[in-house]
Amino acid sequence: MKYFLILLLALVVFVISVTLGANNNQIVTFNYLIAKGDYSVSTLLATLFAIGFILGWSICGFFYLRACISLRHEKRKIKRLEAQMGQSSESSTKTMSTVALNKE
């Protein structure tokens, strides 16, 4: 539900920016590092918002996948250590019972 509300908020911001840009048909000169271009305000707002939105979700997705992979690796390591502990406790139990039988 939380993610749905965040997505809904982003969609509302996008719609508001497109609406404001559509009412203002002014052409602006956008100067970026490589070149410059003349764009309408609505196109520029929609494009920059979409690029930022996609870039933000990509970065968050990358870190989320990295955390999931790390968690899976650590769970595997925990299972392996638990199996080793189980084997060592079984062998110590067998050793103790063998020692007890030899004393009698």
Image (tube, rainbow, N blue to C red):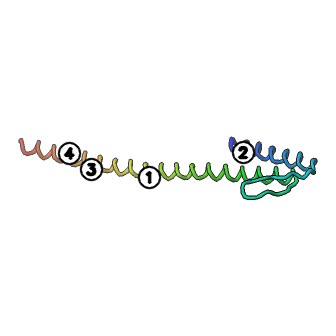
Disc 3 versus disc 1: nearer the observer = 1
> Mark 3 and 1 residues: CB-CB less than 8 Å, in contact?
no
Q: CA distance from mark 3 to mark 1?
A: 21 Å
Which element carries disc 1, helix, strand or loop? helix
Which residue does the image show at 11% across and 44% down from the upper left?
A: 99
> Mark 2 and 1 residues: CB-CB less than 8 Å, in contact?
no
Which residue does the image show at 85% across and 55% down from the upper left?
A: 39
- Given residues 78 and 37, the one toward you in this image is 37
Q: In this figure, which residue is indicated by the disc labeled 2?
A: 4
Q: CA distance from mark 2 to mark 1?
A: 30 Å
Q: In this figure, which residue is indicated by the disc labeled 4?
A: 92
What residue type is disc 1 on?
His
What residue type is disc 3 on?
Gln
**Which comes before the other along the chain, label 3 or label 2?**
2
What residue type is disc 2 on?
Phe
Question: Which quadrant does the N terminus fall into?
Answer: top right
Q: CA distance from mark 3 to mark 2?
A: 47 Å
**Which comes before the other along the chain, label 2 or label 1?**
2
Image x and y of residue 66, in percent: 53, 51
Q: Which mark is residue 87?
A: 3
**Which comes before the other along the chain, label 2 or label 4?**
2
Q: How many other residues sit within 10 Å of disc 4, few (<14), some (14-19) or many (≥20)?
A: few
What residue type is disc 4 on?
Ser
Disc 2 versus disc 4: nearer the observer = 2
Which element carries disc 3, helix, strand or loop? helix
**Which comes before the other along the chain, label 1 or label 4?**
1
Disc 3 versus disc 2: nearer the observer = 2
Q: In this figure, which residue is indicated by the disc labeled 1?
A: 73
**Which comes before the other along the chain, label 3 or label 1?**
1
